[in-house]
Image (tube, rainbow, N blue to C red):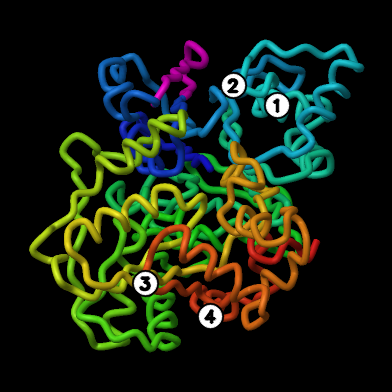
């Protein structure tokens, strides 16, 4: 998905920028970058994170960065930040989101005799394309609104100029941007986790499409937010770090409530509950507290050599790394009936392997409880399923097994209580090899988040969006 961080201060900001950006490492797997501005101009660094993690890549060159304002990014795909020389002045930009109509906008730009200098796996670097769209207008504010008008999908951004930093949240607020402050400095972040140890306090969540311009002295609203919002529900289920808050709602607390809802709907008789590290743990604790049964760690995560959520791009290697990170505890598993909580099942391949290991270690029963409904529709707005085909989703693959095609009776399969829904869940249960399988009800997930349903994006479960 990716995450962005930017800060402007009365003193040198590089330490805050370095650590603030690093606190987004769980959101991306491919690139990390920073840019600062000082009397000599812009200083930029971009590194590949596929074989290491952000801090080690930048540590040796950190003394080369000096400045009172800067922006950083952890990205799934694009090399960022982009530095631009334009009629608006020089600026640096980082973005997070997904541009569905990237190819169409690229063709439009080429037809206007624009050119692109950066490369990404998809050809056009989407952040450079956004910078090009901004530079078509007469101000940064109008340029950002132009991006909102042209882009299908989502795009939140930070723009570093000589005068200050622009923070802009995507048009319907699918990705968060939060403004923080401390004495002599302001910061923008995707994750409020980045604020705690840097002594920033939350000033406000930017609204959908809102534009804020910040200096070290203060900030101004340059565009009011749109009325409608659909923030991604997966931020609370999976993406978000436990200590982060979006729209004032803490991730860890939401996961406790998700687990409690799973427990209230469950009649399985078990010895204890466990969670797949990391996001499954909070769901399991919520389940345990509600059900009044013990929580135990049947799996532990090996962190000494896997200190971040690093995963290679190659799927075979991703599966291997996922396996190597988790170590089963035989004395806890052997002979026991276990409820396992996790955030979701996407492909199901790794989940099946985890379950197989549990039975090999002597588990008597394995009951899986998932914090969200069945994933049936690929995400059109963020990078959650950008590299996956529809049939990579376990739900859609099961529908093809049952119907012969993968896009038939989707609404029935997505509706709990229908015969087709029960057939789908049973098929997935058999495929991953567990004793029982239950998914969260969508209404329980929405209640756990605590926002009105129309303000939360549920496309990957329902296949529709309100706008």
Query: In the drawing, does residue 31 fall left or right of residue 142?
Result: left
- Residue 21, position in %: x, y? 40, 37
Q: Which region is colored magenta?
A: 35-49
Single out the mark in the foreground, 1 or 4. Answer: 4
Q: Which residue is mark 1?
A: 131
How much space separates mark 2 and mark 1, taking CA atoms?
8 Å
Does the CB distance between marks 3 and 4 fall below 8 Å?
Answer: no
Asked if the stretch drawn in magenta spans residue 36, the answer is: yes
**Residue 303's disc number:** none
Image-quadrant location for residue 17: top left
Identified at 29% across, 56% down, the residue is 277
The image shows residue 78, relative to residue 387, as above or below, that is above
Compare marks 1 and 4 and give the one earlier in the sequence: 1
Identified at 53% across, 80% down, the residue is 444
Does the CB distance between marks 2 and 4 fall below 8 Å?
Answer: no
How much space separates mark 1 and mark 4, taking CA atoms?
40 Å
Compare marks 2 and 4 and give the one earlier in the sequence: 2
- Residue 350, position in %: x, y? 39, 48
How much space separates mark 3 and mark 2, taking CA atoms?
50 Å
Identified at 58% across, 51% down, the residue is 393
Single out the mark in the foreground, 3 or 1. Answer: 3
Query: In the drawing, does residue 107 fall left or right of residue 236?
Result: right
Asked if the stretch drawn in magenta spans residue 172, the answer is: no
Q: Which residue is mark 4?
A: 444
């Amino acid at each position: 998905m990716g995450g962005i961080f930017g800060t402007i201060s009365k003193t040198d900001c590089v330490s805050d920028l370095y650590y603030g950006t690093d606190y987004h490492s769980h959101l991306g797997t491919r690139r990390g970058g920073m840019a600062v501005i000082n009397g000599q101009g812009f200083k930029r660094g971009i590194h590949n994170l596929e074989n290491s993690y952000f801090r080690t890549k930048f540590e040796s060159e950190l003394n080369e960065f000096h400045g009172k304002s800067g922006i950083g990014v952890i990205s799934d795909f694009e090399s960022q930040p982009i530095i631009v020389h334009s009629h608006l002045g020089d600026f640096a930009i980082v973005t997070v989101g997904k541009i569905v109509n990237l190819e169409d906008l690229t063709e439009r730009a080429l037809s206007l005799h624009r050119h692109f200098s950066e490369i990404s796996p998809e050809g056009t670097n989407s952040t450079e394309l956004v910078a090009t769209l901004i530079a078509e207008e007469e101000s940064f504010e109008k340029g950002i609104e132009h991006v909102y008008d042209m882009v299908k999908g989502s795009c939140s951004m930070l723009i570093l100029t000589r005068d200050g930093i622009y923070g802009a949240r995507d048009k319907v607020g699918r990705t968060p941007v939060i403004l923080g402050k401390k004495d002599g400095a302001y910061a923008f972040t995707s994750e409020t986790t980045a604020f705690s140890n840097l002594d920033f306090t939350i000033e406000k969540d930017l609204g959908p499409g809102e534009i804020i311009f910040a200096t070290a002295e203060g900030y101004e609203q340059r565009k009011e937010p749109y009325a409608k919002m659909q923030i991604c529900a997966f931020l609370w289920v999976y993406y978000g770090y436990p200590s982060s808050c979006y729209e004032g709602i803490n991730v860890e607390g939401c996961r406790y409530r998700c687990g409690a809802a799973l427990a209230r709907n469950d009649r399985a008789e078990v010895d204890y509950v466990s969670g797949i590290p990391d996001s499954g743990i909070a769901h399991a604790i919520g389940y345990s507290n509600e059900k009044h049964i013990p929580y135990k760690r049947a799996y532990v995560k090996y962190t000494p050599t896997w200190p971040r959520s690093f995963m290679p791009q190659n799927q075979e290697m991703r599966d291997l790394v996922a396996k190597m990170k988790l170590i089963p505890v035989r004395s806890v598993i052997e002979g026991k009936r276990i409820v396992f909580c996790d955030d979701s099942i996407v492909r199901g391949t790794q989940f099946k392997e985890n379950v197989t290991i549990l039975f090999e270690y002597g588990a008597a029963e394995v009951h899986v409880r998932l914090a969200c409904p069945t994933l049936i529709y690929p995400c059109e707005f963020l990078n959650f399923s950008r590299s996956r085909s529809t049939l990579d989703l376990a739900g859609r693959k099961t529908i093809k097994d049952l119907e012969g095609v993968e896009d038939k009776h989707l609404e029935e399969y997505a509706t709990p209580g229908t015969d087709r829904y029960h057939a789908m869940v049973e098929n997935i249960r058999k495929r991953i090899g567990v004793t029982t399988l239950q998914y969260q009800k969508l209404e329980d997930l929405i209640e756990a988040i605590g926002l009105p349903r129309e303000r939360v994006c549920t496309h990957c479960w329902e296949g529709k969006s309100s706008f």
